Image: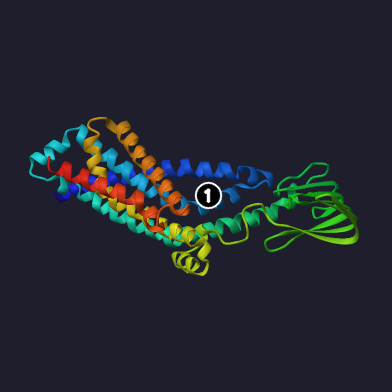
Amino acid sequence: MFLIHRSTLKELLSSFLLSILFLNFTLMMEKLMRLSRLLSGVGASFEDITKIIFYLQPQILILTIPMAMLLSVLLVYGRLNTDNEFVILKSSGMSFKSISVPVIYLGMACFIIGIAMSFYFSPKGSAALRKGLTEILIKRAPMTIEEGIFNTAFKDIVILVKAKPTPDALSGVFILDERKKEEQKVIVAKAGKIIPEDDTLSFTLDSGHVYITKNDMFTEIRFGRYHFKLAPSIESADKKNSEMTPAELLQASRKFPERRVQYLLEFYRRLSMPAICLIIILLGPSLSLMAGKSGRLGGLTVGLSVFAVYYTLLIYGEGLARSGKLPHIIGAWLSFTILAMFAIIVFERVSRK
């Protein structure tokens, strides 16, 4: 029995690693596509892209670890079923629960790794990602400001320069600032200089005018020297929920009652996503038998369908919680509870056969 468990576990691990690579690549490409306009606008290097991919991994692994585990179980146990090895094992006296023991080892390992990713590495990765993108923009944005070409690397900002005597010096500067829709600015200066700072990009402009339009009012300001600051167009300066540790989420839920539900939903999601691995311990082997002899394609289809339904219920439950139609704890755990009940029922039904 030990040899059978060890052999099955080795096959599970190899399938799990291949599934992780496939799923991570798929989700990573989707995230990189969203950042492509921002990165291509400042000419990010291969080293910059590599850093961003590294910072994205903890966030992606929270999603892909349970998915990869379910796919690997469905593929391996589906193969055992297709090759009639299930029949041989049961004929030799092994129960369905005993055959499923290797999944317990994999599930517990995935749960522990998932908790580590969700509670520690993901907040660190999210914060490092924001910092890394900011550094890339501040470092490389001056290089993208070219003579006679409109630069739109910053959100709601258009920059045009007539000449660049040096990489940091500008001549004939035109800036359109639409960050405040109700108060738009046009800045014209004879000369300027780019000054990178910690988290912003500053321009010191000399001898020019600022034209401001607000409602039906028009204002013209003449200046000898003007200091203009730009922040990278990523997100607001406030710390995002994904960058907060579980302790910070709970503390913020008490400190800001108006956003309490949002913080608690994020906290419960950090718990529920790794806990799906415990449900898959019961669900995976059962679904592989219920799928019959449909092969690897059938297992892949069943696995993706399960997660599609789960995430739909998760978003639906959190939406009801945010709108106040359900208590936040029920909305957060609705999809998890339904999947857990389904897994227990299916596992017991298959075990009795």
Residue type for callout 1: Ile
Please give the name of the residue rendered at 22% of the width and 48% of the height, measured from the top-left corner. Answer: 344
Estimate the x, y position of residue 313 in percent, counting from the top left.
39, 45
Estimate the x, y position of residue 256 in percent, counting from the top left.
53, 66
Left or right: where 146 falls relative to 232: right
Estimate the x, y position of residue 108 in percent, counting from the top left.
29, 56
Residue found farthest to the front: 325
Residue 9 visible, this angle: no
Left or right: where 154 falls relative to 311: right
Please give the name of the residue rendered at 16% of the width and 51% of the height, measured from the top-left corner. Answer: 2
State the residue position of label 1. 53
Secondary structure beneath disc 1? helix
Crowd rating for badge 1 (residues with CA inside 10 Å; few <14, some 14–19, many 20+): some
Residue 117: name its quadrant: bottom left
Please give the name of the residue rendered at 69% of the width and 55% of the height, measured from the top-left corner. Answer: 139
Residue 178 visible, this angle: yes
Please give the name of the residue rendered at 53% of the width and 49% of the height, measured from the top-left corner. Answer: 53
In the displayed structure, would residue 235 be above or below residue 78? below
